[in-house]
Amino acid sequence: MLRVLSRILIACLALAGLAAAAYTLWTPGAREVRGIHDLGANGMWLSHGWIGDDGWFSKYRKKASLYRDPERIQEIAVKLRKYHIKDVYPHLCPAEPDGTIPPVDKPQTELLLDCFHGIRVMPWIGGILDTHCFLESPEWRDNFCRSAIALLKEHPRLAGLHVNIEPMPSGNQDFVLLLETLKKRMPPGKVLSIAAYPPTTWLQPVISVHWSEEYYRAISKPVDQMAVMTYDSAAPMPKIYEHLMAGWTREILSWTEDSQVLLGIPVYDDTGVLYHSPRVENIKTALSGIHAGLLSSERLPANYQGTAIYCEWEMDDWEWEYYREHFLSKSTNLQ
């Protein structure tokens, strides 16, 4: 009996060793591909303070000086241009239960637009489904659209709107209807952007945070841009996330022919949750997977715009440098 158990143990150890060796040799990503996938039109999510009114500062005990200082606004504008961030989504959530979006600070918004010339500013509006956002209600949808359009008319230099409602079950037709209505009411030339969910995966087969091919095609018709939240995958190991990201990149770009695509890069530290480990999902593994997915095509798809970093307030100096070294075009002037 002891000999049998010993043989079983040896066999198990051998299999474990083979699995470890296979994982070590597996290279699903492509790290050393700088410049060829940077089109100079990347995106980034920004915090509420950049355009929000004073009520946000008092409610969350934030220092207004961190956002209201003209020199600091100019400083972040210079950094965004330096790293080829063309589209930004300053937070303006959540919507009120009646659909009204939060107010902005008018002088601050105009000051930010003064400093952000050449950068497209699209307020990030929405909230939590069935808590702030009641899509099945025609009245809620009408109030939401009217409130958002009023913001664009009051600040005509805003490039458009960025809608983010979470969670959003695949197949939700009320969301499609909201986007169709919003796009029809927006002034000509304004961009309708959304925070989209990644395709389904066996790692996390939950339809409320993953979209089918059919739903991707339906959503892409009324919108101009999808910034896809290609993270929160529940991937247990870095290479598995790289492999998943490469596959998502190919799928998303093939399913969204009617809108431009930005592929999300996570730089946040949301530890202690099952769906995200910063050791697994980070700027290194995300870029590695994106590069691998893009390299599988002979040429870049016409609907590929670049990457979208979530989020500016979590980005540190090392991550900015890594982004420069492993993604930005070699011809970029970083002086």
Image (cartoon, rainbow, N blue to C red):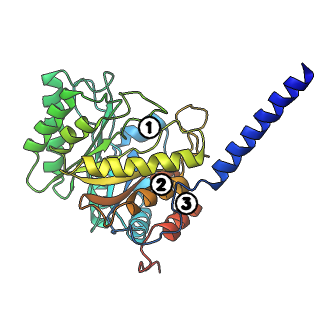
Q: Give the residue pinned by disc 3.
A: 319
Determine the image quadrant of residue 7: top right
Give, as a three-letter code, the residue at label 1.
Ser
Q: Position of residue 147 (x, y in %)?
A: 17, 37
Gap between marks 1 and 2 measured at Cα: 41 Å
56 above or below 157? above
Determine the image quadrant of residue 79: bottom left
Looking at the image, is mark 1 or mark 2 earlier in the sequence?
1
Residues tagged 3 and 1 counted as in contact (Cβ below 8 A): no
Which residue is painted at 33% across and 22% down in the image? 131
Residue count near mark 3 (Cα–Cα under 10 Å), binned few <14, some 14–19, many ≥20 = some
Which residue is painted at 59% across and 53% down in the image? 26
Q: Position of residue 199 (x, y in %)?
A: 36, 39
Give, as a three-letter code, the residue at label 2.
Gly
- Secondary structure of the residue carrying tag 1 is helix
Q: Which sits in the foreground, 298 or 245?
A: 298
Give, as a three-letter code, the residue at label 3.
Glu
Instruction: Look at the image and tell me whether residue 320 can be seen.
Output: yes
Q: Which sits in the foreground, 104 or 291?
A: 291
Q: Give the residue pinned by disc 2.
A: 289
Gap between marks 2 and 3 measured at Cα: 16 Å
Q: Which sits in the foreground, 291 or 141?
A: 291
Gap between marks 3 and 1 measured at Cα: 31 Å
- Secondary structure of the residue carrying tag 3 is helix
Looking at the image, is mark 3 or mark 1 earlier in the sequence?
1
| Residue farthest toward the right in the current orientation of the protein | 2
280 above or below 108? above
Instruction: Look at the image and tell me whether residue 65 can be seen.
Output: no
